[in-house]
Image: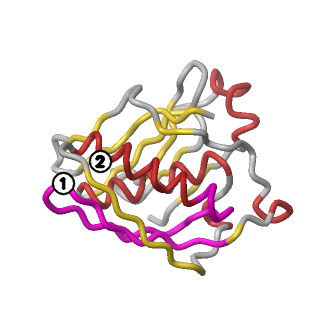
Amino acid sequence: MSEILYWLPACCLKHHLQDMVDGGWRTLKSGNVKHWEHFEHKADIGIRGYGATPPAAFAQCALALTAVSTDPAQVAPRVPVSIACAAPELDALLLDWLGALLLEMDRRKMLFSRYEIQIAEGKLTATAWGETVEPARHQPAVEVKAATYHALAVRQLADGSWLAQCVVDV
């Protein structure tokens, strides 16, 4: 089965949560493997990534971050940007990663759609590929201000895959 992507603009998200399964955007993949999704939160938006490894889950969480503002499929992976951060625990490393990504998005006026991440001994090194925001094409719905500790989790699931999630302030 091929990938099916359902997308709802963030500006409409809070108005439709009652009518939606899983809240917001959701991605269904072949088999039972989910890659990223948004989850309901009272005032903000939850982002969640799944992957075979922590780096893969972090990359999918970053795609969910992009999807808060725009459809990631509309963001061309043209320009590489190097990002590095460190933290003693995976939970804290996820927050540092998302914070560093948000900083680059703001500083460079870019959106990202592709990520290559390595994690070793509490250090994350990554390359994020994206392009400069083009408002007419990307139609950014909201700006993510920060990744928060609310609902923060990085853990291995019963099937051996990894989950990385938190709530982002919009």
- Write down the residue under mark 1: 122
Q: Nearer the viewer, residue 121 or 44?
A: 121
Residue 141's disc is none
Q: Do the residues labelled 2 and 1 touch (CB within 8 Å)?
A: yes
Task: Farthest residue to the bottom: give it.
Answer: 78
Q: Does the magenta stretch include residue 120?
A: yes
Residue range in magenta is 105-131
Q: Is the magenta stretch mostly helix, strand or loop?
A: strand
The residue depicted at 47 percent of the width and 40 percent of the height is: 47
* Residue at numbered disc 2: 93
- Give the amino acid at mark 2: Leu
In primary-sequence order, the first of circles 2 and 1 is: 2
The three-letter code of the residue at mark 1 reads: Gly
Residue 155 coordinates in the image, percent (x, y): 22, 41
Measured as percent of width and height from the top left, residue 56 is found at 31, 60
Which color scheme does this rendered protein use? secondary structure
Q: Residue 29 in the image: state x and y as whole percent.
A: 43, 57
